[in-house]
């Protein structure tokens, strides 16, 4: 296992040499800041499910050695760790999930709950000794019928760890339709700040621009009824096409402008636009 991991690691290093100066793979906060200072694109590795670990926590350590720094506890379905957002009832974290959170705390990996049921988020927050994240979700107070949202109680639980709640930009989790504006997204951010304060809110667009909708919905956790539940009708794809003012990554400028217009200070905007997530990365990963 170690030999194959070393081979993979060497392959990754070769790729990064080719991309040197343009894209940097980062495993620490210092590397992230260095990439920013150099004008490079910084990448960090995460995964949206803990299924890959199986019964052997050595796999988690191996993944850390390869550069993985954040693991989402569940995806849509329930797994050994807890309940995903598409399950019919709001189950919480399991005993195995508690062990997972502890192991990630010990390694210096960020516990993420982006696709979890609210009770799983709350339980993970209780189990974590370090700040955690809910990287990308909407607000159930605004879009109560959308399963890709979190309750105020869950958001507060994340904040209590010192963590960050990231507002997703998928239109159906912003204003319940296939379409939204930057102003709608800014209003969601403002609503989250009112719940937990400026130190615990971030932005996680969840934009996937390179994959087709058919490719994503081919995954077993995306049945037709689940796609319908989050208003993924196929009428608008990628999600960025459903935004007025955020049609591509250049839209981050408009989001900043919207926060300025909303009356937020430069310091607070820096927190929301990445500073809060960077703080968590520093505190957990180092």
Image (cartoon, rainbow, N blue to C red):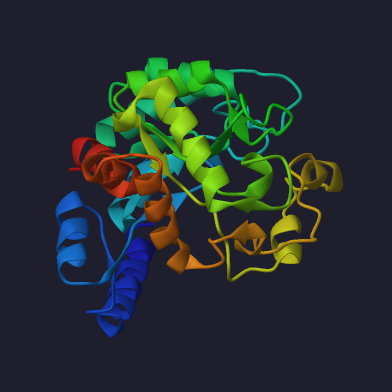
Q: Is residue 241 above or below residue 262?
A: below
* Quarter the N terminus occupies: bottom left
Query: Can you give x and y, in whole percent of width and height, for residue 179 in the image?
Result: 69, 53
Q: Please name whichever residue, 130 or 274, is drawn nearer the observer in this view of the structure.
A: 274
* 237 sits left or right of 277 in the view: right
Note whether residue 109 is visible: yes
* Quarter the C terminus occupies: top left
Query: Can you give x and y, in whole percent of width and height, for residue 162 in the image?
Result: 29, 25
* 193 sits left or right of 146 in the view: left
Quarter of the figure with residue 174: top right
Query: Can you give x and y, in whole percent of width and height, for residue 128 in the image?
Result: 35, 22
Which residue is located at x 70 percent, y 63 percent? 237
* 56 sits left or right of 199 in the view: right
Which residue is located at x 61 percent, y 49 percent? 170
Q: Please name whichever residue, 76 or 196, is drawn nearer the observer in this view of the structure.
A: 196
In the orientation shown, which residue stands out farthest toward the right? 224
Q: Is residue 54 above or below residue 78?
A: below
Query: Can you give x and y, in whole percent of width and height, for residue 235 in the image?
Result: 80, 61
Figure disc tally: 0
Quarter of the figure with residue 115: top right
Note whether residue 135 is visible: no
Which residue is located at x 77 percent, y 46 percent? 231
Which residue is located at x 49 percent, y 33 percent? 113
């Amino acid at each position: 296992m170690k030999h194959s991991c070393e081979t993979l690691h060497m392959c990754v290093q070769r790729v990064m040499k080719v991309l040197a100066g343009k894209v940097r793979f980062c495993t620490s906060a210092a590397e992230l800041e260095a990439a920013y200072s150099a004008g490079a694109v910084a990448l960090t590795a995460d995964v949206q499910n803990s299924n890959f670990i199986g019964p052997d926590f050595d796999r988690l350590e191996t993944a850390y050695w390869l550069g993985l720094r954040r693991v989402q506890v569940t995806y849509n379905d329930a797994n050994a760790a807890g309940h995903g957002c598409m399950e019919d009832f709001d189950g919480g974290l399991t005993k195995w999930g508690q062990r997972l959170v502890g192991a990630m705390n010990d390694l210096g990996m960020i516990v993420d709950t982006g696709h979890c049921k609210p009770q799983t988020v709350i339980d993970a927050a209780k189990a974590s000794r370090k700040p955690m994240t809910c990287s990308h979700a909407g607000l159930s107070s605004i879009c109560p019928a959308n399963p890709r949202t979190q309750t105020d109680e869950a958001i507060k639980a994340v904040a209590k760890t010192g963590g960050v709640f990231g507002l997703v930009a998928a239109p159906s989790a912003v204003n319940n339709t296939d379409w939204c504006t930057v102003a709608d997204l800014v209003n969601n951010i403002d609503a989250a700040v009112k719940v937990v304060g400026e130190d615990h809110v971030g932005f996680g667009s969840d934009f996937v621009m390179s994959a087709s909708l058919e490719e994503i919905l081919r995954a077993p956790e995306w049945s037709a009824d689940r796609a319908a539940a989050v208003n993924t009708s196929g009428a608008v794809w990628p999600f960025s096409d459903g935004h007025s003012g955020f049609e591509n990554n250049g839209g981050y400028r408009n989001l900043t402008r919207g926060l300025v217009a909303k009356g937020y200070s430069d310091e607070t905007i820096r927190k929301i636009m990445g500073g809060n997530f960077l703080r968590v990365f520093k505190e957990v990963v180092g």
